Structures are given as C-alpha cells and as structure tokens.
Image (spheres, rainbow, N blue to C red):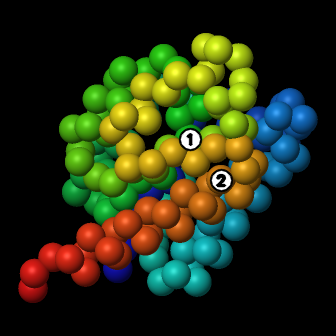
Amino acid sequence: MMRILVLHGPNLNMLGVREQETYGDQTLQAINDRLMELAKAEGVTLEARHSNGEGELVSWIQEARCQFDAIVINPAAYTHTSVALRDAILSVTLPTVEVHLSNIHQREEFRQRSYLAGVAIGQISGFGAFSYELGVRAVIDHVRKTRDKQPE
C-alpha cells in the first residue's frame, strides 16, 4: 500500500486563528481530517505531522526514505530560508510536492522565492486548504504512474 507523509511547517498549528484573510479559517486538524478521508478513499496510507522546528522536519524527511513512498510538504516560512530542508528532500529521492495555502508569488518579494521548488516534482499554491488536497492527489498520481512504468 502506498504511504504518504504530509509535513506541516512552522506556525501552521495556528491556522484558523492567524491571518484568516491570508490563510483561511480552517484549522490544521480540519485539513488533516480531510486528507485522511481522501487517503482512505484512494486506498493509501497517510501520516500527517507538524513541527515548528527545522531540524525536526529535516529528521522526518530523512526517516521517510525507508518508510514512505512520497512526501507532501508545506514548509511555511522555511520555504524562503531553508537550504537544510532542500538538501534533505534532495537526499531522500522521494517524490515531493510543495504546497502553500496562499499564492506565494503574489506576496511580498521575500516570500516569492522557494528553496524547495527546484527539488520538488511540483508546487501548488494559492488554493487555501484545498492546496493540500491537490498536492496529495498529485503525488498519488505521480507514484502510481511511476509504478506502472516499472518492469515486473
């Protein structure tokens, strides 16, 4: 069974409370609940984790190499600063989709650069909480197509 790791970066535990005009009113728990429903419907296993710490996120990415088939990550503020997350994703060679609630390309200049975009198979941003669902769907599709191409 396909296993997907969803990682939520710093301050996403404050969803539903912080800057609702930018990030919407859904809580992180509501987003995770919806992703679990989607995973069940798709016949995949999904595990969601949140951390405010860069090092913990790096460790989880590294550990995912032998436990998961793909990663969906909202690196939040680390999008624009973390070479460490970039290097971790590059090193595990798992298909990774980067997601953002807001459209980072319409925001402040410093938020428009992503250190992860170059090592992710794709980036989805600007669709609020639905960005996560799109990211999970995209990575499921990618893994299934990749598996179909492998000789038996």
Q: Nearer the viewer, residue 120 or 72?
A: 120
Q: What residue appears at the point 22 percent right and 57 percent down from the top-left corner? A: 66
Q: What residue appears at the point 87 percent right and 46 percent down from the top-left corner? A: 25
Q: Earlier in the sequence, mark 1 or mark 2?
A: 1
* Cα distance in 3D space between marks 1 and 2: 10 Å
Residue 137 coordinates in the image, percent (x, y): 53, 67
Residue 147 coordinates in the image, percent (x, y): 25, 75
Q: Is residue 44 above or below residue 142?
A: below
Label 1 or label 2, whichever lies nearer to me, is 2
For disc 1, the neighbor class at 10 Å (few under 14, some 14 to 19, many from 20) is: many
> What amino acid is found at the position of numbered circle 1 in the picture?
Asn
Dots 1 and 2: beta carbons under 8 Å?
Answer: yes
Q: Nearer the viewer, residue 150 or 64?
A: 150
User: SS of the residue at dot 2?
Assistant: helix
Furthest toward the front, the residue is: 106
Q: What residue appears at the point 76 percent right and 59 percent down from the top-left corner? A: 30
- Which numbered marker is on residue 74? 1
On-image quarter of the C terminus: bottom left
Can residue 59 be seen by looking at this rendering?
no
Q: Is residue 141 above or below residue 17?
A: below
